[in-house]
Image (tube, rainbow, N blue to C red):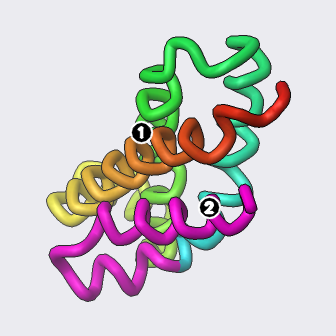
Amino acid sequence: MNILKLAIVSTVSWLAGGADLTAVLFWSFAAALLALPLIYLPVMFLLRRLLRGYKPAAAFPVVASLMFVLPAGFILGMFSADGSGFLHSFVSPEALLFYWMFVAVGVTFGLGFVWCFRKAAI
């Protein structure tokens, strides 16, 4: 049951972060598909272990939202041809769209993680 809840939370998180632009949704899907299960989820489990539970619950969305640069970096790297272009792309106006989107994804995913696993044994 937790897997189904987690799949729902992942989908809602992705939609919450990019519901305004079709192109952002398209490119963010690949990044979210990789980042949510491979980066966000292990970090949430590690945070749960470090905190020995879910208190303070606000730590989960805060930590998840601070990881915004990882999936955004993946997307920005897909469009840069060389190293200097990659670094420059991190301060581009387009990058802000992805930053804000993955901040929203992180907040939603962190809250959803607590909702999914708060009753599970640690």
Residue 104 vertical placement versus 53 (above, below): below
Instruction: Tell me the chief SS of the magenta region.
Output: helix
Q: Position of residue 32 (x, y in %)?
A: 53, 67
Q: Quick one: which residue is furthest to the right in this view? A: 121
Q: Position of residue 19 (x, y in %)?
A: 23, 74
Q: Is 98 part of what is drawn in magenta?
A: no
Q: Residue at x 50, y 40 (%)?
A: 110
Classify mark 1: residues with Cα within 10 Å, few (<14), some (14-19) or many (20+).
many
Determine whether the residue tagged by mark 1 lies in a helix, strand or loop: helix
Using the rendered view, name the quadrant where residue 96 is placed.
bottom left
What residue would you read off at disc 1?
65
Residue 68 vertical placement versus 27 (above, below): above
Q: Could you tell whether 105 is left or right of 51 in the image?
A: left
The quadrant of the image that shows the C terminus is: top right
Q: Residue at x 76, y 28 (%)?
A: 46
Q: Is 3 part of what is drawn in magenta?
A: yes
Q: Residue at x 60, y 72 (%)?
A: 33
Q: Position of residue 106 (x, y in %)?
A: 44, 46
Q: Residue at x 57, y 36 (%)?
A: 114
In the rendered structure, which amino acid carries the disc numbered 2?
Lys
Q: Which residues are magenta?
A: 1-29
The front one of 12 and 5 is: 5
What residue would you read off at disc 2?
5
